[in-house]
Image: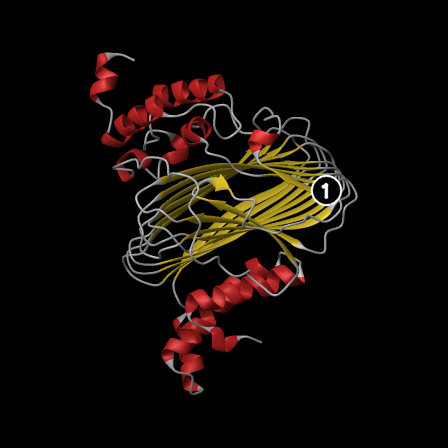
Amino acid sequence: MNAEARVKETQAEASLIEQFSKLAKDQGGLAAETREKAFADFRSAGLPHRRVEEWHYTDLRAKMREAYAPAEGGRTPEVLPAPVDDGPVLRLFIVDGQYRADLGSSAMPEGVTVSSPREVEVKDSLFPSKDAVIDLNTAFCQGGVVVTVAPGTELTEAIEIVHLVTQPETASYSRNRIEIGAQASVLVIERFEGAASDAAYQTNAASEISVGDKARVNIIKLQDEAKAAQHLDSVSIKVGAEADVHHFTLNAGGDLSRTQMFVEFLGEEAKLGCRGISILGSKQHSDVTLFVDHAVPNCESRELYKSVIDEKARCVFQGKIVVRPDAQKTDGQMMVQSLLLSEEAEVNAKPELEIFADDVQCAHGSTTGDIDEDLLFYLRARGIPEADARKMLILAFLAEAVEETENDRVIALLESKVRALLGAEEYAE
């Protein structure tokens, strides 16, 4: 690295360099040379900034003013969060970046195996080759969990992966792999929370998910980090032939959050639904960036993301559907819709299509607006207080994204979470 580049290093970048020099390179199931290569790539690029197209609206170099040191392992939370619903569940806990087998379900049903990365061979990454945040995750990875669902397994239990941070002013780096066999059926719920609601900390998580042919998969991400936390999550999904995959992200926590997803179709006749809701206030900054790669013919994808933005919060959505030259008969539809509740709320929406085939049905769109005053007047004229009327209209706006998940348990879970976030529990059916 030349002298000019060194002068331009931020305080956070300098801290990361120092931390990596002291890191025990044999943890987390990754070889030392893998870590060294990843950190060299990160150091060459630095933290992403506005001049990096994919990070134009989320200038991490400016927003990440300091880099906390990796959390120490071995601490046990005083209280474990209850399951998200009353349905059957298999629970796995990742505490301060490390998998804690002693805290979760004691036994797995037939067809499901769970291990930590250090207990299995770490395979080649499913992520793109150039991404500074993923490079940091690889370099500092403390652990994670490997979940394998055997072909043909139909799980009645949801697999709930709970990420907990117990130590303020620390960083957690976890890497998970979920391998779902052909014709399997599974619901995965991934939660991100802090033990203290006002703690400042940093999460850098990554999940690599492979879905076998004809598998049926629902994946729910509930991001409810502490108010001052920074949350970075990278997700790679590889979709097999005739598979049916639904992914839903609910963003509500954190001062800064970014979920970046990379989805690739590997076999024909597969279906993908990526949906999400962001509910933001104060000065929160939330970013969802999605890349869907139609690499083979005859596949369908649906992307729908909705946000409700209040006070001085900012919501970013970047989505791109790429249709490769051989991916004829692709059907891809992307929509992002935002509801602004204050004059200072802000949204940046950038849905895109990149099409190299000629026999496709693809569309994208974006809408931004505020509460419909005519509908609000209509409800108030019927004796409904204004605050309640606003909640009802917001719930109606968000309902479409939830209902399209097409899974009764998921719909009930998400409806309950959304009502709680809006303080609208009284509107439960």
Please tell me how crowded label 1 is: few (under 14), some (14-19), or many (20+) other residues with Cα within 10 Å: many
Residue 348 makes an appearance in the image: no
Q: Residue at x 46, y 31 (%)?
A: 141
Query: Residue 4, position in %: x, y?
Result: 22, 15
Q: Secondary structure at mark 1?
A: loop
Quarter of the image with the C terminus in it: bottom right
Q: Nearer the viewer, residue 292 or 93?
A: 93
Amino acid type of the residue that numbered disc 1 sits on in the rendered structure: Ala
Q: Residue at x 41, y 73 (%)?
A: 390
Q: Is the image coloured rainbow, by chain, by secondary structure, or in one colour?
A: secondary structure
Residue 130 makes an appearance in the image: yes
Q: Residue at x 51, y 25 (%)?
A: 30
Q: State left or right for residue 101 relative to residue 110.
A: left
| Tally of marks | 1
Query: Residue 45, position in %: x, y?
Result: 36, 22
Q: State left or right for residue 259 relative to residue 17.
A: right
Query: Residue 39, position in %: x, y?
Result: 40, 22
Q: Residue furthest bottom?
A: 383
